[in-house]
Image (spheres, helix red, strand yellow):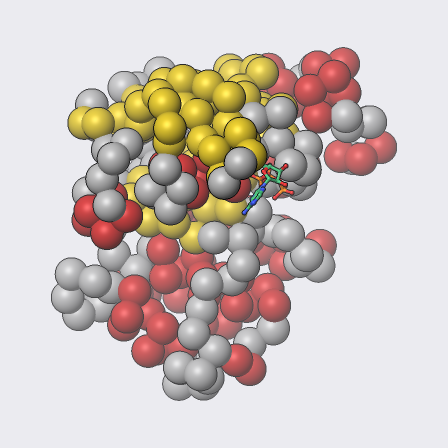
Amino acid sequence: MSEPILRLEGVETRIGPYHILHGVSFDVPAGELTLLLGRNGAGKTTTLRTIMGLWRASAGRVLFDGRDITALPTPDIARAGLAYVPESMAVFSDLTVRENMVLAARSGPLDSARLDWIFGLFPALRRFWQSRAGVLSGGQKQMLAIARGLAEPRRLLLVDEPTKGLAPAMVRNMVEAFRQVKAAGETILLVEQNFHAASALGDDVAVMDNGTVVHSGPMRALAADAALQQSLLGLSLDQHQ
Ligand SMILES: Nc1ncnc2c1ncn2[C@@H]1O[C@H](COP(=O)(O)OP(=O)(O)OP(=O)(O)O)[C@@H](O)[C@H]1O
């Protein structure tokens, strides 16, 4: 396994009076796709938001490439090379697809070779390039949100439930797109509820429950162990066939 680019050590997060994360620890190895799994309310989104500094850890550390980023303001965390695609399709509906992409490339103009690569992942974006993002379907908006995260090279992409609410054909497209993003050597931390999609993609997995990580290891070991899936995720066999 390669060196971790991201390491969480005993991260605690409180939201107002609620103690949500209770000592979250796991690694994200460079160049791999790591899955963050867990039942609803386990704390996955809170973990991504804490990494980005959108919630503040009250204890523990977030290390990015060995550097402590726990207390950095969110713009500095983004500048360090992290991109975050939240669950709620982060696109500007009144702007065109092109404008959405231009705004996402923070360090300068869009690179045309990179854009061609993104069009290869999500062909609909080329078709709707000059259209308002508001006219896209839910799945296409989700693709635009992910494309915005890919608009320029980042060191780590955090993506929250990209297949949520998508029709099965769209889920297959999304899985294929992530396969290609992974093959291009990008490092990804992915929250995914669809276990079938998750098992097709992940190298490593961290499973959360009740605000802490209850299991971590290779995805293929979890994918091969139905009893472990049942105990960690409450999955029955027919749910992921
Ligand atoms: N703004 C908030 N105020 C209070 N509690 C919150 C807030 N956001 C999240 N929580 C609580 O924190 C816990 C973890 O939520 P989180 O969204 O991180 O879970 P999750 O694993 O991402 O779940 P899901 O799959 O449902 O998105 C839940 O009990 C949730 O109700």
The quadrant in which residue 135 appears is bottom right
Q: How many marks?
A: 0
The answer to whether any part of residue 110 appears in the image is: yes
State the image coordinates of residue 115 (x, y, percent, origin top left).
Answer: 30, 65
The answer to whether any part of residue 127 appears in the image is: no
State the image coordinates of residue 108 (x, y, percent, origin top left).
Answer: 15, 66
The quadrant in which residue 63 appears is top left
Q: Nearer the viewer, residue 177 or 69?
A: 69
Q: Nearer the viewer, residue 228 or 224?
A: 228
Report the side of 198 relative to 133 (left or right): right
**Residue reaching furthest to the left:** 108
Please tell me whether residue 22 is drawn above or below residue 17 in the rendered image.
above
Q: Which residue shows up at 31% across the image and 27% down it?
A: 62
Q: Which residue shows up at 24% across the image and 45% down it?
A: 73
Report the side of 165 relative to 176 (left or right): right
Placement of the N terminus among the 4 image quadrants: top left
State the image coordinates of residue 218 (x, y, percent, origin top left).
Answer: 51, 18
Q: Which residue shows up at 43% across the image and 53% down it?
A: 85
